[in-house]
């Protein structure tokens, strides 16, 4: 056992399913372990590394900003924070023009739920079966899977889960206490399930008719992952609140609650974040967004995702039930539990992750090359054919 693994095993809290590899370096879609072994990364930090590891734009921005100012609390104005707010206003829907900065996706969802309560005075929310919105108490209450929820019961009351892609189920749950609906455009952790256009159009309509706040959780799907800058753009349906995080700052922790006039200004002191919107992370986010735009990464994700999915569908294996995805967010639904194949792929120098019990999730950096995709497909085919 390596010294790195030994130390982490001794001191870690034990809440992660560890893989027997110590990653020490990365570039683009490739990472290397402590022994210099090369791996193709199809985990990408659970969707953090959209622009690739060791991205030169982000490295330059961090170095320059670190030499000027790293921290500045939000009670003082700051140039980089102001610049990022303006940039987010440019790339988000017209009805969104305010941005609360925090440190993660779960914090973004948590902030959104609080803001909806403030704006509406109501306390109940509707979420979807198979949803994943985070692990803090409010976000966890919106999350569906019992394995995440059960150890921490009782959770925040007033959250109801209904089948995904089923507008009638949502309509039946709405009552006078309902404040809003929170939903993913593509359910990532839940197994790469894709919402359809009619569902989101109907959801927007029913929220308008009933005076509900519509929250889109794009923590994992934002910033080019699905072939658009944001996944809602596939349907031209706009949220009242957009929650973003993961890849926004090229690997530096950041989350944002994006909202507009339906929420309005948040009362002074009602919410806050010590590290949220610090100059270093804002500089990294500006650089990451510029890289996404300069290199047309959403378009590349669309093109490469279609190629990747088609190649995977050509695999002749009785273990595959379905290959589905949008852009470079791809799931292979298997007839067996997927984690077994995550471990087998690791032995073939491919990093992958499960999404639910039977779905193998492939989510590489958007800078992955075609020959690297081909290599991943060959290794996936090899491990599946070992079992039939």
Image (cartoon, rainbow, N blue to C red):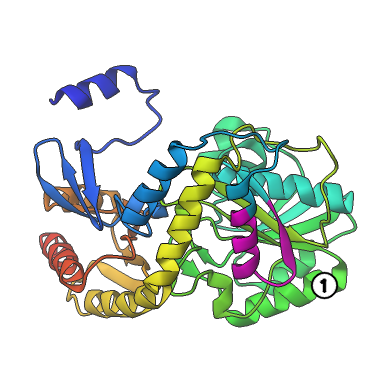
Q: Which quadrant holds residue 356?
A: bottom left
Question: In the rendering, at what x and y percent does residue 312 appear?
Answer: 24, 74
Between residue 123 and residue 62, name the one nearer to us.
62
Q: Which residue is mark 1?
A: 208
Vertical placement of residue 255 versus 184, above or below: above
**Residue at 38% over, 59% down:** 50
- Mark 1: which secondary structure? helix
Question: In the rendering, at what x and y percent does residue 346 appear?
Answer: 18, 48
Q: Say left or right for 44 vs 180.
A: left
Circle 1 Cα neighbour tier, 10 Å, few/some/many (<14 / 14–19 / ≥20): few
Is residue 142 among what the camera can see?
A: no
Give the magenta-colored segment's residue range.
83-99
Between residue 29 and residue 82, name the one nearer to us.
82
Q: Which residue is situated farthest in the top direction here?
A: 10
Q: Which quadrant holds residue 134?
A: top right
Is residue 102 among what the camera can see?
A: yes
Q: Quadrant of the C terminus?
A: bottom left
Q: Was residue 88 drawn as part of the magenta stretch in this picture?
A: yes
**Residue at 42% over, 49% down:** 61
Between residue 175 and residue 2, name the one nearer to us.
2
**Residue at 35% over, 23% down:** 12
Q: Which quadrant holds residue 171?
A: bottom right
Vertical placement of residue 150 versus 38, above or below: above
């Amino acid at each position: 056992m390596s010294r790195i693994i030994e130390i982490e095993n001794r001191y870690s809290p034990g809440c992660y399913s560890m893989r027997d590899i110590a990653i020490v370096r990365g570039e683009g879609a490739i990472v290397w372990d402590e022994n210099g072994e090369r791996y193709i990364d199809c985990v990408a930090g659970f969707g953090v590394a959209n622009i690739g590891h060791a991205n030169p734009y982000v490295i330059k921005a961090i170095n320059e900003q670190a030499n000027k100012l790293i921290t500045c609390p939000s009670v003082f104005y700051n140039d980089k924070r102001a610049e990022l707010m303006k940039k987010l206003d440019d790339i988000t829907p017209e009805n969104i023009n305010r941005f609360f900065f925090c440190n993660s996706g779960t914090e973004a969802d948590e902030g959104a739920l609080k803001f909806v309560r403030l704006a509406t005075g109501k306390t109940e929310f509707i979420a979807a079966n198979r949803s994943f919105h985070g692990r803090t108490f409010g976000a966890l209450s919106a999350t569906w899977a019992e394995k995440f929820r059960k150890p921490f019961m009782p959770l925040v009351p007033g959250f109801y889960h209904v089948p995904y892609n089923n507008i009638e189920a949502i309509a039946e749950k709405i009552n006078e206490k309902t404040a809003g609906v929170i939903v993913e455009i593509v359910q990532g952790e839940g197994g790469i399930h894709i919402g359809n256009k009619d569902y989101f159009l109907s959801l927007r309509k029913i929220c308008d008719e009933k005076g509900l706040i519509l929250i889109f959780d794009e923590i994992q799907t934002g910033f080019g992952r699905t072939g658009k800058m944001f996944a809602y753009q596939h349907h031209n349906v706009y949220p009242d609140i957009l929650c973003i995080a993961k890849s926004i700052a090229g690997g530096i922790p950041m989350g944002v609650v994006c909202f507009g006039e339906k929420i309005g200004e948040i009362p002074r002191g009602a919410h806050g974040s010590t590290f949220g919107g610090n100059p270093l992370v804002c500089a990294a986010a500006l650089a990451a967004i510029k890289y996404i735009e300069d290199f047309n990464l959403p378009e590349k994700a669309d093109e490469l995702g279609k190629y990747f999915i088609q190649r995977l569908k050509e695999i002749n294996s009785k273990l595959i039930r379905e290959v589905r995805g949008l852009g470079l967010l791809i799931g292979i639904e298997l007839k067996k539990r997927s984690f077994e194949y995550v471990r087998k792929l690791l032995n073939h120098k491919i990093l992958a992750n499960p999404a639910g019990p039977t779905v193998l999730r492939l989510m590489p950096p958007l800078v992955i090359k075609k020959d690297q995709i081909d290599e991943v497909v060959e290794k996936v085919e090899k491990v599946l054919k070992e079992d039939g």
